[in-house]
Amino acid sequence: MRQPMVAGNWKMNGSSDSVKELIAGIKAGMDSVSKAEVVVCPPAVYIPRVAGAAADSEIKVGSQNICDEDKGAFTGEISGEMLKDVGCEYAIIGHSERRALYGESDELVAKRFAAARRNGIKPIFCIGETLEERESGTTNDVCARQIDAVIALEGVEALADGVIAYEPVWAIGTGKTATPEQAQEVHAFIRGKIAALNADVADGLRILYGGSMNAGNAKELIGQPDIDGGLIGGASLKAEDFLAICTAAN
Ligand code: PEP
């Protein structure tokens, strides 16, 4: 039985005061969350503050990225060891905004995945197709290619150390959610593809959906057989909305 997971990607939002308020609000509502593992991924500078506030709760903290290298002359990057040091258990890797806006290739994303693993951080590995790719019928090929880059570097068993987040790019921040059927179809493809290599890994692997998930659509999406939770952007910035998604997994 896979434990559902709901992770909030706060992206580049917040201030010292607002993140304090947000984490306090989520903490206050955690009693209503009975099943889901809850993770929040604040901007890097606020991770220590949020991890400190979450320390006496069930809430886990993640980063929004991780350097593929471990130490040295990599200006602006943050290593896995540093993230671990300030309380991160998870790291988002390969988010479509990183891929599209900062040119992260499948190969670089795979190296970041490897860096997370060797530092004991669980990757939240994001994959997904653009609208153009969906319309040209290549959704599964794109997802397979992105997953294969990690498998080529780390082996299929490595996937057991993290979670996959299927996030159709056209659904991220647009208010256009994939239908439960559309999402389930891709999730089933992903699980089937991995099962062909290792059935145990596929069976235990949590595959989250991301892309305009909100309090209104979460229950139906998470209710699909191969959808094990959500990676939430916009709706993770208000404690009440985020908690409503977390409880939808009850
Ligand atoms: C995301 O950025 O990972 C995401 C899913 O964003 P949103 O929920 O705002 O679509």
Image: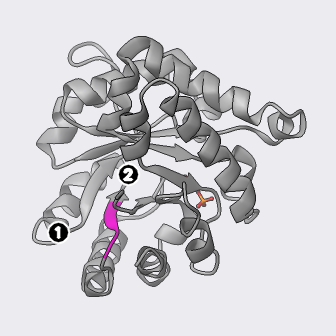
Name the residue: 48% across, 53% down.
Answer: 11
Q: Which residues are magenta?
A: 35-39
Residue type, label 1: Ala
Q: Is residue 249 magenta?
A: no
Q: In the displayed structure, does residue 14 sit left or right of residue 71?
A: right
Can you identify the residue that label 1 sits on? Answer: 53
Mark identifier at residue 43? 2
Q: Is residue 153 above or below residue 185?
A: above
Residue closer to the observer: 120 or 65: 120
**Among the 4 quarters of the image, the one containing residue 177:** bottom right
Whole-angstrom CA distance, mark 1 to mark 2, is 15 Å
Tell me where residue 179 sits by quadrant.
bottom right
Mark 1 falls on what kind of element? helix
**Nearer the observer, 203 or 84:** 203
Q: Is residue 195 above or below residue 12?
A: above
Residue closer to the observer: 185 or 86: 185
> Disc 1, ligand 1: is the CB inside 8 Å?
no
Q: Position of residue 186 (x, y in %)?
A: 67, 45
- What is the x, y in percent for residue 209? 56, 55
Q: Residues within 10 Å of mark 2 (few under 14, many from 20)?
A: many
- Name the residue rendered at 29%, 73% in the picture: 23
Predominant SS of the magenta segment: strand
Q: Secondary structure at mark 2?
A: loop
Image colouring: one colour
How far from the left and from the top, in percent, is residue 221? 61, 67
